[in-house]
Each structure stands twice: as C-alpha cells, then as structure tokens.
Image (cartoon, helix red, strand yellow):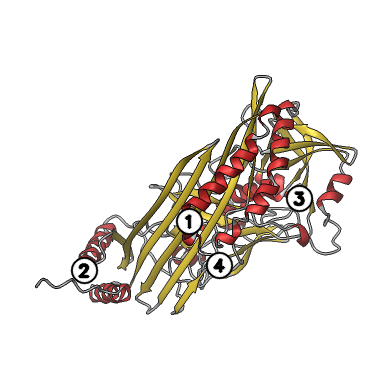
Amino acid sequence: MVQAPVKIQTTELATLAIDLIRQAGCEYGDIRLCSYRSQNLTASDRSLKQLQDKVSSGFGVRVLLKGAWGFAASHRQTPEEITRVVALAVDIAKGSRLSQKTPVQLVPVETYRDTYVTPIEIDPFTVPIQEKAELLLSLNEKLLSYEQQGIKKAFSFLRFTKEEKIFASTNDSLINQTIYRSYPAFSCTAIANNDAQSRSYERPPLNIGYEHINPTNLFSQVERVASEAIEKVHAPKGPADIRSTLILKPTNLFLTIHESVGHPTELDRVYGYESNFAGTSFATTDKMGKLQYAAPWVNFKCDRIQPGGRSTVGYDDEGVKSQEWYVVKDGVLVDYLTDRETAHRLGRGSSNGCAYADSWSSIPMVRIPNLGLEAGADGGSHTATLAEMIADTEDGILIDGIGSFSIDQQRRNFQFGGDAFWQVKKGKVVGMLKDVTYHSMTTDFWNSVDAVGPAAEWEQCGTNICGKGEPMQLAQMTHGCVPVRVRDILIGSGSGS
C-alpha cells in the first residue's frame, strides 16, 4: 500500500526556514508563506465580460548576511524546497555583498506572536457567483434604460481579495494574518453631438466583507449618474489658461493626496532606492521640520489601524505593528513612510511599518499606508462645510471623481482632471462643465488651501492599483479626506482630460 504524504503545517515550514537562516550565520532573516485569492466580475452592457477566480500561493525568504540582502521564492511549500530556497537566498546575499558599498542596517522591532483577521460580516467568497453576476447585469440594464436620453454604454464590476499569510522572523515573531477586501463600481457613457462623456460611481475599495457591496445603495445612484452623464455630454467645455478657485470633493482630492503627498514621502524614493519606475522626491530629508508643505491648517496623517482602510492590517511585511503618525503637521513636513532599513538611515529608533510585498514572490518595499487629510478643527476660522464653501465662492469650479493625471518624477509639478465638473457663480452651482484640468506645483497647491471640511464630511476614498518598483508591484491604500477649497489655481484646456 502506498501511503499518502504527510502534510507539513505552514508553521512548521516557517520554523524550519528560520532555523536554517540562523544556521547560515545571517544577522537577520524572515519568511512569508502566503496565499492570495482574487475574484473579479465585469459586465459590459448586457453581457458578463469577465469572470476570474484565482489563487496564488507560495513563500518568499529574505536574509541579511553581513549587511547584504538576499531574497528567493518558490510556489512549492515542502521542507525540501524550504531548504533549497533558504540556501539560494543566502547565496544571493553573498553575491550582493560584492557590489555593495554600505552595509544595510535595520532598526529593531519587537517580537510578536499574534493573529489578525479583517473584521467582516459576510465572507465575499461564500456569496454565489450567480448572485454577483445578476447584480452587475441588473445595474447595467437600469443604466441602459436611459438609452433614449443618450446613454449608450454601461459598465460595472465587483472585485474581491483574500490575503492569507504567515510571517516568521529570526527575532522570534510569528504572525498569522487574513485580509479581506471588497470593491464595487459602475459607470455609463452618454453620446451626443459627436462627443462621448462618462460618469461613474464607486463604493470605495475597502478592507471589508460583502456587506460593503450594498445593492440598495448602488441602485439608488443609477439615476443620478446617468443624468449627470447626459448633462455632461451637452455641457460646455471648461475654461483654459485662467486661474480660478477650486472646490474639490474627497472623491477627487484623494488622488491628489496620493500622488503629491503619499509618493513624495516614501523614504526609499527620497533616498533614490526606488527611482526607475516613477522617480524620486523633492521632499528630501534636509527639509524635514522646515518645509512649509501646506497651509498651517492642513494636516496629513498616516493610519494603518483605520477601520476598513485599504491598507489596514495588523502588521506590515517586516512584522512591525500597525500604527498612526503625521507626515505633515500644521502644514510642515515632519516625517516619512519607512521600513526598517530606511528608518535606520533616517536616524529613527523604529520603523513606522510601511513595508509591503504584493506577492509571495515579491520582496517588501516601502508603500503608502492609509494617508489622509484631517478634518478642519471645530470652530476653526478655516473650517467650512461643502455648502459653505460653495456659498462663499464668487467664481469657481466644483470637481467630483477622478480622471487623468500626470506628475513629474520628483512630484513637484502636476496636472489632474476629474469625473464631473460644475461651475460655481455667486455662491451657487449653475451647471456642468466638461474637460477640465487643474495644474499646480505641489507646495503651491497645498499652501493655497483656504477652507477644509469638517469631520462630518470625511470620506474614505482610495485606490487598489498603486504601482511601484521594477518589476512593478501593486498595492492599495485609503486616503480619507474632506472637501477643500483651493484659491488661485491654473485651469488648463481639457485636451488631456
């Protein structure tokens, strides 16, 4: 009789890897044993165009030997493969030392033996595919019911992920995490007068269960979205080459925060470690504590413990416990996003936990956490509701949703579009515009903010497709924020929007 192979528990494989790393004489090492499940459904018009449900699993080993990194990975989770991959990572570290000028040093990290699971009500992977597909097709059908008014295309999607990983390290940490993420959205396109304009709606990508989908909420937005797409296609183009006041909703502002505050404060980018894919940063460490990044009433805070946040986890991929901290306080640059290596170079005693790898086969790097704009102070002279901002604006543009964008490699000079635009005249919204972009320098823009919304208008907006590195890794994060009003901003032509 042939006996079935004995299944080795992942914790035993993790322990084996750590023992081998220590035996090799490494000053540090860790292993991540991971499984990622993703499910994507996409509907276009009256057809389901994509149904994808896939799982990727494996492990990655990282070692630090005499100040040099070595990393290797495999999809085969067996004791024999653990042994081979640890040896390969050690050999790579030995090779890396040959060209390394400065040995890597790491700040210390506490030992944790813990389990973290995203709080959810409904596991999205237990909901039948048919139910999800019917939801998307029903949304599209309702959008297309406005066909006589000009809606010619409808699009909708549902995206879910489940990330399971065990992290173990030579400092005796053993951390088990399960992260759930859910994301629904839809859009439609109106065609008229040889033009096509789209309008979209999404419930922001969050770490939450299927309860986030909320079909009642989705259907309640269809009439508004379709009507605004129709109005938009008939609207006049926005002004060009003028300066104007902008009132930005959180659905637009989050991307400006992401590109002009998040990426410039990634410390590996500041040090030039990650420059091939998307440049470096103007916010160099000599400016810390000195640079007036924004107006004094503007504060940007990182928060990896934020309930539902897209980058909310228990620990980062170096075993650093999630935390919160300011990068811009009272308008001044005061901190960065770090991993254990960059924190040591900055002279800090600990990392603020921004290391993340998008796969078992990827090496962790500094990634933007949940980074948001704090609400205005209660009763503050620069705190105003969205309605108050509009009522107090003689001539301006209100922007909702995101569109195209561009920003230079050091994150100084940018251009952003949007999904919907309204003209504001004498304190009232008087009609839609289309093809609007705004242009500015990062610090000029944030120092021109003269009104910040209250806590009651704070929204969790964010992205699930932030790309960085070569080969590129994808990460996700929430940029919770409130509406703002920004004065004297250059409005460009809409040709790139």
Q: CA distance from mark 1 to mark 3?
A: 41 Å
Residue picked out by circle 3: 484
Q: Position of residue 488 (x, y in %)?
A: 78, 39
Badge number at residue 120: 4
Q: Amino acid at mark 1?
A: Pro
- Name the residue at the left extreme: 1
Of residues 193 and 486, the one nearer the viewer is 193
Let me know if residue 318 appears in the view.
yes
Crowd tier of the residue under label 2, counting other residues whose Cα lies within 10 Å: few below 14, some 14–19, many 20 or above: some
Apparent side of residue 110 relative to residue 90 in the rendered image (left or right): right
- Mark 4 belongs to which amino acid? Ile
Residue type at mark 2 is Thr
Q: Amino acid at mark 3?
A: Val
Q: Are marks 2 and 1 in contact (CB under 8 Å)?
A: no
Left or right of residue 236: residue 2: left
The label nearer to you, 1 versus 4, is: 1
Badge 2 or badge 3: first in the primary sequence? 2
The residue to which callout 1 is attached is 128
Q: How far is the residue under mark 1 from the one under mark 4?
A: 17 Å
Quadrant in which the N terminus appears: bottom left
Mark 2 or mark 1: whose residue is earlier in sequence: 2
Label 2 or label 4, whichever comes before in sequence order: 2
* Precedes in sequence: disc 3 or disc 4: 4
Upstream in sequence: badge 1 or badge 3: 1
Q: Nearer the viewer, mark 2 or mark 4?
A: 4
Identify the residue under disc 2. Answer: 83
Classify the position of the C terminus by image quarter.
Answer: top right
Crowd class of label 1 (few under 14; some 14 to 19; many from 20; radius 10 Å): few
Residue 30 % position (x, y)? 35, 70
